[in-house]
Image: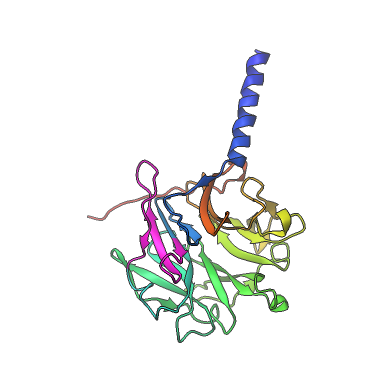
Amino acid sequence: MMRTALILLLTILITDLRAQTERVTLTSLNSEYIEYAPSISADGTKMVFQSNRNGDYQLYESIKNEEGKWSEPTLLQGKINDYGDSTDLIGGPSLSYDGNFIFFFASYNGGLGVEDIYYSEREGDLWGTPQNIGAPISSKQYEGFPSISSDGNSLYFMRLNKNLEKQSSCYTLMVSHKDADGNWQEPYALPEKINQGCEKFPKIMPDNETFIFSSIRENTLEGSFDLFQVRHLGNNEWTEPLWLNYANTASHDYFASVSSVAENIYLNTKGAGNYDLYSYYIPEHLRPKKVINVKGSGY
C-alpha cells in the first residue's frame, strides 16, 4: 500500500516537473522573421499576432483544427492592414472575448500621438475600418499593446514611463474603465507592486482577475524581462506578483495569452534569432479560472 502511494506521489511530481519545463515551439506559426504579441480567442481556436514577414509589421491570424494543429498564418482580412500607408506600424492585437472586436496600436496619420490605440469591429468575415479609441486613452504620449477585459469594460495598456524616457524599453502599465454610459474614463497607473519602474505588455486573462505582465526586477533571469502574475482582489487591490518560473527563460519573455479553457499559455520568447511563438502547459495551481463559453443561434 505504501509502495503504491509512493509511486503515485512520484508520478505526480514528475508530471508537474515536466509541465513546468516543457516548451512547445509553434513551428507552423514561426518564420525566419519576427512573430510577436499573440492573442488567443476565448475558445482557443484562433490566434492573431503581428509579424514583419512581409517587410512591415502587420496583423496575421491562424486557425487551430480539431487535431490541434495551427494553420499557415494569413494576413488578417479587412481594412486594418490596408488602412494608412505601408510605413505604418501595426501591432499588439487583443481580441475581445466575443470575438467581435480587436484592439491594437498603430501609427496611422492623424492620431493624437506617435502611436495610438485603435479598435476594429468584425463585419462578417472581415474587419472594419480602424477607429482611434480617442482621449483620454490615446494621448500625445505613446500608448500601445492594449488588453481588453472579457466584459469589455476595462482596457489595460502601456504608456511610456516619463521618468525613464531615455530607456525606451520601460513603460507604465495603465488601465481605463468604462462608466455607466459606456465612456472610457481617465486612465490610471496600476499599483506600485506592479509598476516598479520597468514593465511591459499587460495581459488580463478571460477570468477578469488574473493579470500577467513582463518586468525587469532584481530576481529576473540575467536582467531580462520575465513574466509575473497577479490576481485582482477588487478596488485596485492586487496580490503580490508571482514570478512564473515554468515559463521564464534567460531571454526576454513577453505577451502571455490564455484562452478561457486556461490550460496553455502562449507567449513570445527570443530564440537563437528573432522572437518566436511558444506555448507551455500551465501548472494547475497557477491557472486562471476557467470560463464557460455558451454558443447559441437565433431562430
Residue 57 is left or right of residue 220, and the answer is left
136 shown above or below 96: below
Q: Nearer the viewer, residue 23 or 258?
A: 23
Residue 167, given in percent of the width and then of the height, sits at 69, 74
Q: Point out the image quarter for the C terminus.
A: bottom left
Residue 162 occupies quadrant: bottom right
Residue 194, percent from left and from top: 69, 62
| Label tally | 0
Which residues, given as a range, are shown in magenta? Answer: 49-77
Nearest to the observer: residue 274 or residue 49: 274
Report x, y in % for residue 185: 56, 76
Taking the magenta stretch, the answer to whether it contains residue 254 is no
Residue at 66 percent across and 65 percent down: it is: 199
126 versus 252 height, above or below:
below
Q: Main secondary structure of the magenta part?
A: loop
- Place of residue 55 in the rendered image (x, y in percent of width and height, measured from the top left): 43, 70
